[in-house]
Amino acid sequence: MNRDAQELKADARRFFLTEVRKLSQADRLRHSADICARLPPQSAWTQAESVLLFSPTADEPWITPLLTEALNTGKIVTLPRHIAETGEYAACQIRHAEEGLAPGRFGISEPAGDSPIFPLNELDFVLVPGVGFTLDGGRLGRGRGYFDRLLAAVSGFKCGVAFDCQVAPQLPLEPHDIRLDCILTPTRWHPTTTRARS
């Protein structure tokens, strides 16, 4: 990545994180609840048998209730876990929403080391965090590239999730940045691909 692109992405990250941090804790929880209510009726979710979710940071929507919902409806539920040997993330299966998790490399809750790894190319649905999104499926991550590399191996449905203030008309994206099938916010389920509209 050239320096100009790096600087543009860094500026965009600062902007979005500032916008999210303007939200009160009450607003974040209310918007998160709206997100958690908007996803379950969608066919991409109801038809998925295996899903990859994530443990939210303080700046991300609180989607933990969706782990419980997915487990209660019989889905195979996975979370990212950093694999020290490869330096990358894998999808590891969990059986309880908040048990068997421990802080990982970046302080984010991850499945325990003995959790089974689920093949990325067999996942039906991935809920994707990010710093910023566009309505045509663009995603700006935190800059380390871990999630883009993970998503490159996923053939299932990829859904970005964010607060409304994290959606912009355009982002400084590059060809290697993975495009998403849908963007989910507190106020919308926005398909970005033909697959998401079916």
Image: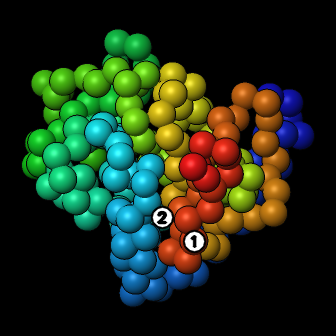
CA distance separating discs 1 and 2: 19 Å
Whether 40 is drawn above or below 174: the answer is: below
Residue 182, visible in the rendered structure? yes
Up/down of 155 relative to 55, above or below: above
For the residue pair 156 and 127, the one nearer the viewer reads as: 156
Q: Is residue 164 left or right of residue 111?
A: right
Instruction: Tell me what residue is drawn at x 13 percent, y 24 percent.
Output: 114
Q: Quadrant of residue 185?
A: bottom right
The answer to whether residue 171 is left or right of residue 38 is right
Q: Which numbered circle lies on residue 188?
A: 1
Give SS at disc 1: loop
Residue at disc 2, secondary structure: loop
How dense is the environment of label 2, judged by Cα within 10 Å: few (below 14), some, or many (20 and up)?
some
Q: Which labelled disc corresponds to residue 115?
A: none
Residue 2: x and y in percent read 86, 30
The quarter of the picture where residue 19 lies is bottom right
Residue 82 visible in the current orientation = no
Quarter of the image for the N terminus: give it.
Answer: top right
Q: Is residue 18 above or below residue 105?
A: below
Residue 69 coordinates in the image, percent (x, y): 22, 59
Look at the picture and state if 100 lies above or below 97. Answer: above
Amino acid type at image mark 1: Arg
Can you tell which mark lies on residue 59?
2
Q: Residue furthest top?
A: 85
